[in-house]
Image (cartoon, helix red, strand yellow):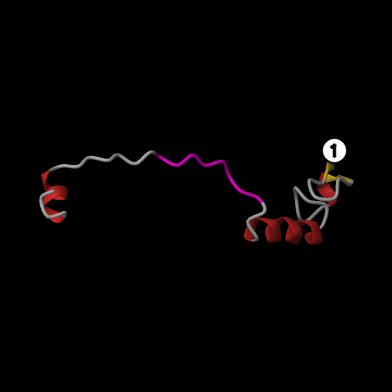
Amino acid sequence: MALVRCPICDTRFEADSSPALPFCSHRCRRIDLERWLGERYGLPFEPEEEETDFGADDRELDGGF
């Protein structure tokens, strides 16, 4: 049986005996979920640059200036 390491508490456990894979227990699974919901974890994000195109429509809204 394969031993794996819990990403939360770093405990080694048998993968076949855990009902909460990849975590060793439901407690560690809940800790991980709380971290995601509390925004302590996140995915890398690069905002797209906004294009600034000041066309005729924009000038009309600004009073033609």
The answer to whether 39 appears left or right of 5 in the picture is left
Q: Residue at x 78, y 61 (%)?
A: 26
The one nearer the camera, 17 or 49, is 49
Q: Nearer the viewer, residue 2 or 54?
A: 54
Q: Main secondary structure of the magenta part?
A: loop
Residue 38, x across and y down, in percent: 65, 60
The magenta stretch spans residue 44: yes
* Residue for badge 1: 2
Please say whether residue 45 is one of the residues in the magenta stretch: yes
Residue 27 lies in quadrant: bottom right
Numbered range of the magenta stretch:
41-48
Residue 14 horizontal/vertical position (percent): 87, 45
- Judge from the rendering whether residue 27 lies leftward or rightward of residue 63; answer left or right: right
Q: Residue at x 78, y 51 (%)?
A: 23
- Where is residue 44, by image quadrant? top right
| 4, above or below 27, in the image | above
For residue 25, what is the image quadrant? bottom right
Identified by mark 1, the residue type is: Ala
